[in-house]
Structures are given as C-alpha cells and as structure tokens.
Image (cartoon, grey):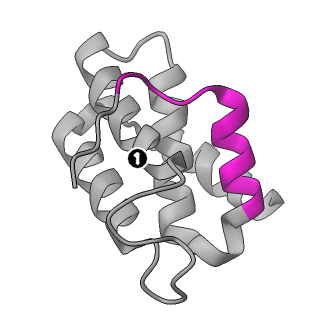
C-alpha cells in the first residue's frame, strides 16, 4: 500500500482526532502528538523539523493507515512509531516546554 502525504493536518483536524480519540490512543500517543503539534506550530522550530513533524501528524490524523485505529490495543502502534521516529529525528526542536504543555493539555482532555 502506498500512501502519499502532501502537507500537515489542519489545526481543526488535528484537535478533532486527538480529542475524539484521546482515551483510545492512550497517553503516550496523545502526548507525542500534542507536543509534535506544539513544536510544529512554534515559530522557533526550524522548517525542516516542521516538515518531519507535519508528516507524522498527517499520518496520525489520516483515516486509513497501516494498522487501523479501530483495532483495540494495537490500532495506534503505527502512529506511535511514526510520531516517535519524527520526534527523535528532529531532536531538540521538540523542547521540554512543548512536553510540559502537552502533558497539561492531556490532563484537560
């Protein structure tokens, strides 16, 4: 299966996916997604890092992916891998401040 990702998700589609699926995706996937979104939206984040994060976020919100999100227990493992790889790739572009803000947002969902 070939999937083409052209751009990052809109703010509306990202927050809709996270708020509707927060409990199902679990804390780690949700926090990785939120902190990736915050870093991508940060004006201090380099463009190259924004592109990597945007690709992983687009994968998170896509309705079709390698492992369907509806599969309980495993549906978000591919999203976790994509987000984790993206965050690792961009290194310090995702800051401790993004992490703290993401954890706070998670608590409010």
* Residue 7 sits inside the magenta stretch: yes
Which quadrant of the view contains residue 12?
top right
From the viewer's perspective, tell me whether residue 43 is left or right of residue 54: right
- Identify the residue at image location x=28%, y=63%: 81
Q: Is residue 29 left or right of residue 21?
A: left
Q: Position of residue 96 (x, y in %)?
A: 44, 43
Could you say where residue 53 lies in the image, as x and y percent from the top left?
Answer: 35, 34
Quadrant showing the N terminus: bottom left
Extreme residue in the front direction: 1
Relative to 41, say whether 47 is above or below: above
Image spot of residue 44 (x, y percent): 42, 12
Residue toward you, 41 or 12:
12
Which residue occupies the foreground of this view, 41 or 44?
41
User: 13 and 98: which one is in front?
Assistant: 13
At x 53%, y 21%, the residue is 41
* Residue 18 lies within the magenta run: yes
Seen as rendered, the residue at the extreme right is: 108
Q: Quadrant of the C terminus?
A: bottom right
Counting the numbered discs, the total is 1
Give percent across and percent down for residue 33: 50, 50
Question: Of helix, strand and loop, which one carries label 1?
Answer: helix
Give the quadrant of residue 21. Answer: bottom right
Q: Magenta part of the protein: which range?
A: 6-20
Question: What residue is at 57 percent from the left and 60 percent from the top?
Answer: 30
Using residue 102 as the reference point, say whether residue 104 is left or right of it: right
Per the picture, the main secondary structure of the magenta-coloured stretch is: helix
Residue corresponding to mark 1: 59
Q: Is residue 13 above or below residue 100?
A: above
């Amino acid at each position: 299966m070939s999937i083409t990702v052209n751009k990052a998700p809109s703010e509306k589609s990202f927050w809709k996916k996270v708020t509707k699926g927060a409990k199902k995706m679990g804390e780690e996937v949700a926090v990785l997604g939120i902190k990736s979104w915050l870093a991508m939206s940060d004006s201090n984040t380099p463009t190259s890092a924004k592109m990597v994060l945007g690709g992983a976020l687009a994968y998170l919100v896509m309705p079709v992916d390698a492992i369907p999100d509806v599969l309980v227990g495993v549906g978000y493992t591919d999203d976790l891998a994509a987000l984790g790889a993206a965050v690792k790739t961009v290194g310090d572009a995702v800051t401790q401040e993004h992490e703290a803000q993401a954890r706070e947002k998670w608590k409010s969902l």
